[in-house]
Image (cartoon, coloured by chain):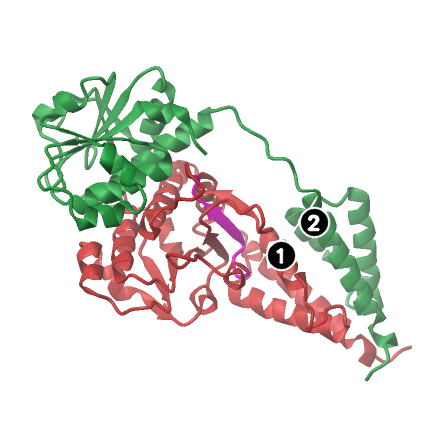
Chain colours: A red, B green
Amino acid sequence: MYTPALEHLCIVMVETSHPGNIGSAARAMKVMGIQDLRLVAPRKPYSQDTWALASGANDIIEQAKIVPTLQDAVADCHIVIGASARSERTLQWPQMDSRECGVFVAEHLPQQKIALVFGRERSGLTNEELDHCNTLVHIPMAFDFFSLNIAMAIQVLAYECATAVRLAMPSETTPPDPDDALASAESMESFYTHLEQSMIATRFLDPENPRLLMRRLRRLFGRAGVTVSEMNILRGMLAAFAGRKFQTRE
Amino acid sequence: MYTPALEHLCIVMVETSHPGNIGSAARAMKVMGIQDLRLVAPRKPYSQDTWALASGANDIIEQAKIVPTLQDAVADCHIVIGASARSERTLQWPQMDSRECGVFVAEHLPQQKIALVFGRERSGLTNEELDHCNTLVHIPMAFDFFSLNIAMAIQVLAYECATAVRLAMPSETTPPDPDDALASAESMESFYTHLEQSMIATRFLDPENPRLLMRRLRRLFGRAGVTVSEMNILRGMLAAFAGRKFQTRE
């Protein structure tokens, strides 16, 4: 069953080592009705394996965008979800399991553009890459020391999203308020840069010893999901704070 | 998370052509905590691919039973579920989709021994084999002419069963991290007052014409749920911004 809402969901694969995994991922996506694949700096060019494993999902590979960084890959997305091998107790990002992720995605499509991000086969996503994610998702597994193949993980999450969208379909009603549209990842990045500069300028943040300040603020705002109109307020407020000392006093 | 109930679930693969698919299937099972694999007359002996793709699930391959017929494979099972590439309108067997199958399996384990049966890569199960099944299961897909790789199908159904079993178990509560405790309403109010004063001081907010600024900021931070440690950052940041003009410049 074709579900147009899934057009707003993209899969991002970061520095994939095995070209075969890209083919398997494309097939896993296509079967579930997801078309938009984005590749961040794949380690090797497409191989025979890529096309053999894509097995009819060639169109997805042919249309895949190849970009140098995760930031480029998700620039037009409103919600970025990073796949994590397991529930990270040490990390302080918000977390969902795969079932919750499907429900979350179904709730936010098609108003929002959503990216599901998968890291390297062996090492996953770096903390810097996780900073670009609003939330993490993990697939519950039987053993901590064991993990799914990356294409299998894409299959499971694509399946969860497609199932949740399908189950949510009969009851779609409320037209979205344009004021409530989420700010894009690009606009969020620009805000974070502004915020960081303001904190450095006021010496609240020491660039020599930044601690986890920016990461924690990203976590806070990422969790909230900042709308376009809220972003205008935040940027205006920062500009006003920065301009303060230049202001003529009455 | 290990769930003993899954010991009563077995996966049966009938006349599998590609030894690599058996390896991938073993990994898919193991990740979800399913151990019992049964192979009906596989077409080829195990290959390098089998072991490479099993990737740590060697024990499942080593313990797999190889039998000549489906009837032998499911002899000790109480419920036999046949995987079908799609919802078969022409067939007169009872049908479930993959989500319903998970719930069904969770309901009947561990009292019953259940087999999930997967047919040949190209042609699936014969009608005679379907006669040995109590019910059929299919995974809903976006396109009728397209299908999942067999190991992917095993992954999805193993995942559905493991998830349903997990959700059916009494929930275990994780102790909260004190750092993640939410700021009290009192502390939030104090923050909002501080924020409002800062905005008035920098003339971003005109007390004569406050518009909905504070309401919108309350909505943003209220939605996020600010933790105690995040509150410390926000308050510190506001104090730094306010102190800026008094600071000696270097």
Residue A45 visible to the viewer: yes
Q: Look at the numbered disc 1 and give the secondary structure of its residue.
A: helix
Q: Main SS of the magenta segment?
A: loop
Q: Which residue occupies the foreground of this view, B140 or A81? A: A81
Q: Amino acid at mark 2?
A: Val
Chain letter of mark 1 equals: A
Q: Is residue A235 left or right of residue B56?
A: right
Chain letter of mark 2 equals: B
Q: Which residue is mark 2?
A: B226
Q: Are marks 2 and 1 in contact (CB under 8 Å)?
A: no
Q: Amino acid at mark 1?
A: Phe
Q: Is residue B182 left or right of residue B249?
A: left
Question: Which disc, if any, is residue B120?
Answer: none
Q: Is residue A212 above or below residue B243?
A: above
The structure residue drawn at horizontal position 14% and vertical position 41%, both measured from the top left corner, is B121
x then y, percent, for residue B134: 21, 19
Residue range of the region highlighted in magenta in the rendering: A131-140
The structure residue drawn at horizontal position 85% and vertical position 76%, both measured from the top left corner, is B245
The structure residue drawn at horizontal position 31% and vertical position 37%, both measured from the top left corner, is B29
Residue farthest to the bottom?
B250
Q: Which residue is mark 1?
A: A221
x then y, percent, for residue B11: 24, 30
x then y, percent, for residue A24: 26, 53
